Image: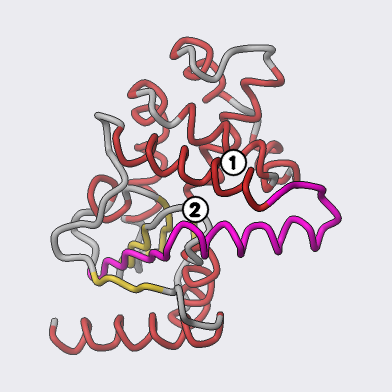
Amino acid sequence: MIIAVDGPTASGKGTIAKALATHYGLPFLDTGLLYRAVGFQVLQNCGDPDNPHDARKACDFPETVLNDLTLRSEAVGGLASRVSVHPEVRAALNKRQVDFAHQPGGALLDGRDIGTVIAPDADVKLFVTANAVIRAERRHGEMTGRGEDISLEAILVDILARDARDSSRTNAPLKPAADALLLDTGDLTIGGAVQAAIALVEAKLRRG
C-alpha cells in the first residue's frame, strides 16, 4: 500500500504522515528533508540557492547531512523552497523518492508533489492544509518554544512567500491531486487531525 501525504508548510502533514506510517506499519520518507538537505548543502558550498547550477551540485550531499538537526530550522526550510523550484533539482531527487514509494509492501511519503508526480498511483492521497495565519501561529509557537526570537509577522510573510513559490513553480507545483482527500487541520488538535486522517484512509480503502 502506498499513501501520499501532501500539503503546505506547517499544515500538520508531517505529524500526520508519521502517525499514519506508524499506524499502518509502513516505511516513511519525509521528502521535504531531501530538499532541506540540498538547501543546506548549497550554503556549505558557498553557493546561491537561486542559481540552478549551484542547487543541482548540492544534490550530491553526503548522507550524514540528513541527520543534521539544522535541517529542521526555519532558515533551511526557506532554502528548501527556493532550491525546489529548479527542475534540475527535482529531477535529481525524483528517482530516489519513486524507488522508495514503490518498494515491496509499499510506503508512506509526505511532501508537496507525492500524489501528483512521485506516486500518482498511490492507494490513498491526502492533501493536508490550513489557513496561512493558523499555520504561522503554529510555527511561531514551535519556534518561540525552542527559544528562537522571531515575530509572528515575519513567519507569516515567510509562509506566504513559500506558498507562492511552491504553488506557482512550473515543475511539480504544490496542488492537490484530482483524487486527493482534503483534510483541513485548522480547527483540529494534533490528536484530532491524526484520527481524522486515519478515518479518511480507512474510508478510501473500504471504497477501493
Local secondary structure at mark 1: helix
Q: Is residue 118 above or below residue 199?
A: above
Task: Report the side of 156 relative to 140 (left or right).
Answer: left
Are the residues flagged by discs 2 and 1 in contact, CB closer than 8 Å? yes
Residue 124, percent from left and from top: 26, 71
Q: Nearer the viewer, residue 208 or 176?
A: 176
Give the distance between the C-alpha atoms of the residues marked 2 and 1, in whole angstroms.
9 Å
Q: Is residue 150 magenta?
A: yes
Q: Quadrant of residue 130?
A: bottom left
**Image quadrant occupied by the C terminus:** bottom left
Which residue lies under the disc numbered 2? 9
Residue 98 shown left or right of residue 30 in the figure: left
Name which residue type carries label 2: Thr
Callout 1 amino acid: Gly
Q: Residues within 10 Å of mark 1 (few under 14, many from 20)?
A: many
* Mark 2 neighbour class, 10 Å CA radius: few under 14, some 14 to 19, many 20 or more: many
Q: Is residue 141 left or right of residue 157?
A: right
At a point 47% along the width and 38% down the height, the residue shown is 161
For disc 1, the marked residue is: 77
Quarter location, residue 195: bottom left
The magenta-colored residue range is 123-151
| Rendered residue at 43%/31% (across/down) | 84
Q: Measured from the top left, where is residue 27 in percent x and y?
A: 48, 65
Residue at the front extreme?
153
Task: Measuring from the top left, give residue 7's x and y in whole percent.
Answer: 38, 57
Label 2 vs 1, first from the N-terminus? 2
From the viewer's side, name the closer residue of 171 and 151.
151
